[in-house]
Amino acid sequence: MPAQTNNALKISLTVVSKYGTLIAMAAMIALFWALSPRHSFLSMTNVLAVVNQSAMTAIIASALTLVLVVGEFDLSVGYHASLAGVLCTGMIVRSGFPIPVAIAAMLAIGAVIGLVNGLLVTKAKVNAVVATLGVGTMLVGLTYGYTQGSPITSVPAEFKQITLGRTLGVQNPIWIMLIVLALLWVLLNRTALGQRIQAVGANQEAARLAGVRVDRTKNIAFGIAGCGAALAGLMLASFLGSGTQSAADGYLMDSFAAVFLGSATLRDGSFHIVGTLVGVLIVNIGFNGLSLLGTPVFWQYIFKGGILVLAVALSSIARQAAKEV
């Protein structure tokens, strides 16, 4: 193969491996815009709706990203978010805590639960999948025990306004999401802690030899993931107007889909905050577009699983092919 053709092929494959998910997202947007009734897909109302629907998933997924960057897994985040929603509403409705106090307490509890996950992995040497799945299962039990199977209702209007209200004409969850994403991006890319997190994920033993406290770094990452899950859980409770058991369980799959989709965006298979946001948007754009077209719900779930496998597979194939050319 001529050198010029070889170089062109390599460049094309590199572009696909880094920008394939963005190209796919642009193609999805164009397709749904063309097919949606009265081209309503790209109306400002619908665009804001898609971003608003993405907010809670983006918060959980972006915090979860730090755990994956550090080389571990957390399968408890969805169950953790469900527990946070019922505990926060319970503190407000049953115990009479002021809303700010209940929120602060729930975020602290979320960080502690995340830290427990971290300690099980780093100190007890339990595999992260087993440890976090076990903790998640216990959280399910605590959630049902606390609610006795009945939603906690009569939530104050002020609590509902956290997610139903608007600031400068934009839904509050969008602002909260942007703040969380910005903070986590800065933490991961512009702080010493972020550099340690990336170093541990890249080569744990090399990081240890360089003086990085590996176990502490992992524990912090798990704690942040727990805090993110708690924040998303109480936001979901605010949106629903009640603390409902298992309400956020489905965020586990959505978050992992977003993070792994994001790893196939802009970088060579590494997890990062911007990529996670792209992954979240792809999933929600697909859901929203299929809903506007009146597609049966089961196709939406097939899409979510299929787009994840397809995007990551194509990116991996293109990246490997580029190396071999």
Image: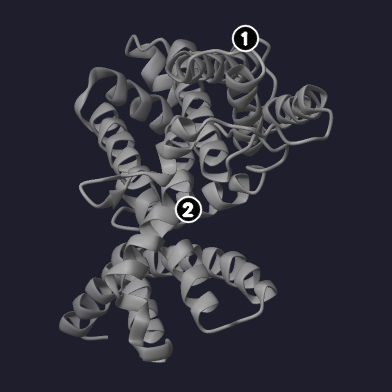
Image quarter for residue 209? top left
Q: Residue at x 64, y 28 (%)?
A: 128
Residue closest to the eye, 69 or 91: 91
Where does the image place residue 120, in percent across and percent down from the top left? Answer: 65, 15
Q: Residue at x 76, y 31 (%)?
A: 140
In-image side of 179 versus 32 (left or right) = left
Where does the image place residue 288, in percent across and percent down from the top left? Answer: 48, 70
Identify residue for label 1: 123
Q: Does any portion of residue 325 appear in the rendered image?
A: no
Report helix, strand or loop for mark 2: helix
Residue closest to the eye, 115 or 142: 142
Of the residues tagged 2 and 1, which is closer to the observer? 2
Up-down: is 193 above or below 243?
above
Q: Does any portion of residue 26 appear in the rendered image?
A: yes
Q: Amino acid at mark 1?
A: Lys
Identify residue for label 2: 258
